[in-house]
Amino acid sequence: MKAEQQQKGATKTVKKVKVNKKAPVRLWVKAAFTGFRRSKVQQNENQALLKIQHVDDVSSSRFYWGKRVAYIYKAHSLKNNTKFRTIWGRISRSHGSNGVVIARFNRNLPPRAIGSTLRVFLYPNRA
């Protein structure tokens, strides 16, 4: 009888788990690889032209100068337990007046990457 009374009188302590209902923070901006820097008769494969999302003029493209860029692609064979590979680069300067930027990569981007999406990371921060 005493055991039943103790069980009824006992209060349960429930530990509340904090659930993050927000989306994870994304530290990169989408950019499209539009092609290589070129003239009428030649092109420079070591200078890639990128159109960054929501960047429409030179003044807003200046924020991205020096930021790191990654081209992520999928290969057939495993390397380091993954099929995904990256080519890293850096934004060097603006190109024209409509927000296009020039980026230089460690290995030049392949031509099949034209039109694909790249990630422009928001670091290093110069502030």
Image (cartoon, rainbow, N blue to C red):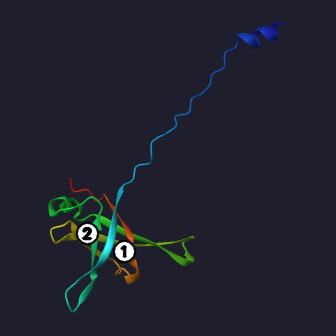
Residue with the mark numbered 2 = 91
The mark found on residue 103 in the picture is none
Residue with the mark numbered 1 = 115
Q: Is residue 86 left or right of residue 51?
A: right
Please report whichever mark, 2 or 1, sits nearer to the chain's N-terminal start: 2
Q: Is residue 109 left or right of residue 18?
A: left
Name the quadrant containing residue 30. Answer: bottom left
Q: CA distance from mark 2 to mark 1?
A: 17 Å
Task: From this view, report whether residue 1 is shown above or below residue 125.
Answer: above
Residue 84 is situated, as x and y percent measured from the top left of the image, at: 50, 71
Amino acid marked by disc 1:
Gly
Name the quadrant containing residue 101. Answer: bottom left
Give SS at disc 2: strand
Q: Is residue 95 left or right of residue 21?
A: left
Tell me the crowding category of disc 1: few under 14, some 14 to 19, or many 20 or more residues within 10 angstroms, Cα based. Answer: few
Name the residue located 80 percent from the left edge and 11 percent from the top edge: 4
Give SS at disc 1: loop
Residue 93 is situated, as x and y percent measured from the top left of the image, at: 19, 70
Name the quadrant containing residue 68. Answer: bottom left
